[in-house]
Image (cartoon, rainbow, N blue to C red):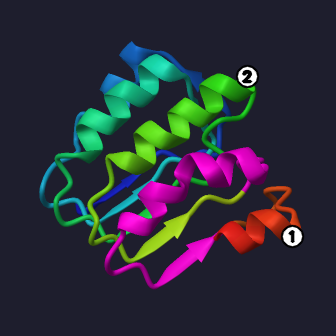
Amino acid sequence: STVVDLTVGNERELLTRERAEALLKCCGENITEVHLGTKSFGADAAEVAALELKKCKNLKIADLADIIAGRKEAEALEVLKAVCGALPTTIKVLDLSENALGEKGVRALESTLGSFTELEEVSFYNNGLSELSLKLL
């Protein structure tokens, strides 16, 4: 398959490094789409995700909605930077909804978002974005 979908079953799960390794071991060059929602990545799990996502050279769609639930702000921002920073610059669709980004999240992702050269669609639903956050985008 060319799709990695962790949302199947829609079960909320706080991922450990080991669990992230098990779930993401199928990543590779042939993967064009990932859906990581309903799984909450801590720093260790995000490190694994970043390593695996870097293998996905042909990735076009990244659904990263709701991947930091239950995490403290500092860790959540590092997770978002690590995971988004591992995406290929040729990504076309990115969903960052439900991550409570706010202004700090937008600032943390500013350089990464600017590096995507073929981005056609970005979703930021329910992220508590202020007018200033929107201007930053």
Q: Which mark is residue 57?
A: none
Q: Which residue lies at the image location 45% right of the left edge and 85% below the top edge? A: 120
Report if residue 60 lies within the magenta region: no
Query: What residue range appears in magenta?
Result: 98-123
Of the image marks 1 and 2, the number of the one nearer the N terminus: 2
Helix, strand or loop status at disc 1 = helix
Residue 130 visible to the viewer: yes
Helix, strand or loop status at disc 2 = loop
Q: Quadrant of the N terminus?
A: bottom left
Please state which amino acid type lies under the numbered disc 1: Glu
Q: CA distance from mark 1 to mark 2?
A: 24 Å
Q: Which mark is residue 72?
A: 2
Q: Which residue lies at the image location 50% right of the left edge and 47% below the top edge? A: 36
Where residue 55 sits: x, y (%)? 17, 47
Pointers 1 and 2 in contact (C-beta within 8 Å):
no
Figure check: 8 above or below 72? below
The answer to which quarter of the image holds residue 131 is bottom right
Relative to residue 71, is residue 52 drawn left or right?
left
Tally of marks:
2
The answer to which quarter of the image holds residue 75 is top right
Please state which amino acid type lies under the numbered disc 2: Lys
Mark 1 or 2: in front is 1
The answer to which quarter of the image holds residue 33 is bottom left
Residue of label 1: 131
Where residue 51 sits: x, y (%)? 25, 34
Where residue 41 sits: x, y (%)? 54, 29
Q: Which residue lies at the image location 37% right of the left edge and 47% below the top edge? A: 85
Q: Which residue lies at the image location 43% right of the left edge and 56% below the top edge? A: 112
Where residue 122 sits: x, y (%)? 56, 74
